Amino acid sequence: MGADREGHGRRTPARVMVYAAGGVLLLAGCASMPDSGDLRGVESTPRQDTQVRVFAVPPGEDAPPSEIVQGFLEALTSDDPHYRTARQYLTGEAAKTWRPEVSTTVLTDGPGAKAEGPGGLEDTGEITYRLTGAKMATVDAQQAYAPATGAYGRTVHLTQDKKTEQWRIDALPQGVVMGESDFQRNYMSVNKYYFASNAVEAGDSQPTAVADPVYVRRRVEPMTQTVRSLLTGPTRWLGPVVRSSFPTGTALAKGSEALAPDDRNKLTVPLNDKAAGIGTNRCQEMAAQLLFTLQNLSPAVDEVELRADGAELCSLTQEAADAAAFRSSVRRPDYLYFVDAKDRLVRIPAGSADPEPDQAPGALGEGDTALRSVAVSRDEHTAAGVGLDGRSLYVGSLVSGGSLGEPLLRSQGHTEQDRLTTPSWDAHDGLWVADRDPDHPRLLLFEEGKGDPLEVRTPHLDGRIQAVRVAADGARIALVVDKGGKKTLLIGLIEREGKPGKRAVRVVELRSATPELEEVTAMSWAGDSRLVVVGREHGGVEQMRYVQVDGSTPDVPAPAALTGVKDVTAAEDDQLPLVAYSVDGIVRLPSGAQWQKVTEGTAPIYPG
């Protein structure tokens, strides 16, 4: 229920009061609304500076039903922390039972409203309005975003108090609804961090951090909201493959004030007694989760101190957190790799525009095996390459003089397009590749990049895999899947059971990250929860965009336009430029600049 409206008729704008010096914007819900026909109300509230706060105005004396509905919808788009003003538009009983936090429904143009039944129903002391619109997304009680489609239709019922003769809403849907621009103004995406639950057994000395994006209200104590969300645990989608170091039931201590760092950027987090008595190592993992989660919020947090029962549990700095747990976005690759005109593996320093690449050490760079695509392990010790005809997968060390040996895998596909995809490495030296053979399509994993492959089960996968990119955390995977000529980007979870050598691996909970694109031609991970995608909408032109794993659009500028893109790669470290293979060869996109040609070549790839 929000202010972002489509208006095909005359608009009657709400009165707006702005207090610029105090950074306050008051929205008064007082546009006139007909008792029949479509509601054509307030213009979408403009995106405001992040320091400007928006507050709604309570219902006016003797306001007619139209203004009550309109005012209520406006109040839902304000910065009122507990929707106290919105509740003033409800009867006492409705205010007690309404739960705005259970969901947020986002509409493309905001809700319209229409009085149901013939005119004159106000004379009966009750009236119903139907709210309508086109859905584009929902945010659930866990603050998890999901794309949505279809029509939205809900009703609000109003009654007139017999004594005061004031109109109020006495029946309404749970949650809130608003238009896209109001949602963008009111909410922001933040990454919570948990640890991969299936990586410890591999002998890792560090837990691996996995991002879990959620949406919080932008100007309603976002730091406190984010910490509360972290403590309640991962979202339902990510939950099966991650763990939290916080004991079950951990929450902020009762009566805690809004969280804010001190003048040394140190944040003290008081926890309830569920966290009391934990060991130092576990406490430091908890603090690392907090520091990773709060890294992009303002004001900055450089250190976290955890307390419970009035005593300090532990304290951790950002630098120590990066040493305590692996997080892909802080690991900067040494090189960008690609295939040169001689079909050999070459490299240039990451971030460099040097047009003269060096031959990569090892058999894939120094040998005579012609390559069509490559992948380099994240430690940059090993490389994998697919032969020029797409049939054979090779693996070799990045050490001069090494031999290549026989292929690890051969595809039986009849054409190049029906053979092996570009391979992909996870952070635990697992090598992934898909065989596109229509007679035997498979997703395969070579543990430690060698030996016999595990065939990865993909229950509920509808279509044939065309491209594979594994997230650095080894818990999530991005797949381009072809079904009936439509190529879409799906994100799935990687579940592992059993011990190395006797392990069963499957990809589950696949969901679309680009529901509006029907022809995805290239993609790459571009952060802990972000990907860069090349594709086109139905009847549209090719475009490059960033997407979140939950299907939302991150609040960052889209990459500059580039035509004829065949491959794209990005590092999790967003300080490094995007690199693509297009009709112009290998090109790079430095921050704030246009695409620049680097050199001739194909199949560019950062490690991963």
Image (spheres, rainbow, N blue to C red):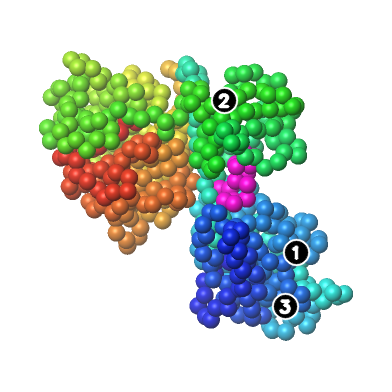
Mark 1 residue type: Gln
**Above or below 62: residue 254:** above
If you read the primary sequence from the N terminus, does the residue marked by circle 1 or circle 2 appear first? 1
Distance from the alpha carbon under mark 1 to that under mark 2: 44 Å
Nearer to the camera, 114 or 21: 21
Residues in magenta, as a range: 215-229
Mark 2 residue type: Leu
Number of other residues with Cα within 10 Å of mark 1, as a class: few under 14, some 14 to 19, many 20 or more: some
- The dot on residue 64 is 3
Quadrant that contains the N terminus: bottom right
The location of residue 195, given as percent across then percent down, is 53, 29
Residue 216 lies in the magenta stretch: yes
If you read the primary sequence from the N terminus, does the residue marked by circle 3 or circle 2 appear first? 3
**Above or below 176: residue 228:** above
Residue shown at the point (39%, 52%) measured from the top left = 557
The location of residue 6, given as percent across then percent down, is 52, 71
Which residue is most to the bottom? 120
- The dot on residue 210 is none
Residue shown at the point (61%, 36%) measured from the top left = 262
Relative side of 512 to 55, left or right = left
Residue 472 lies in the magenta stretch: no
The location of residue 314, given as percent across then percent down, is 63, 23
Number of other residues with Cα within 10 Å of mark 3, as a class: few under 14, some 14 to 19, many 20 or more: some
- The dot on residue 316 is 2
Distance from the alpha carbon under mark 3 to that under mark 1: 14 Å
If you read the primary sequence from the N terminus, does the residue marked by circle 3 or circle 1 appear first? 3
Instruction: Name the residue beneath numbered marker 1.
Output: 88
Location of residue 41 (image quadrant): bottom right
Q: Nearer the viewer, mark 1 or mark 2?
A: 2
Nearer to the camera, 420 or 251: 251
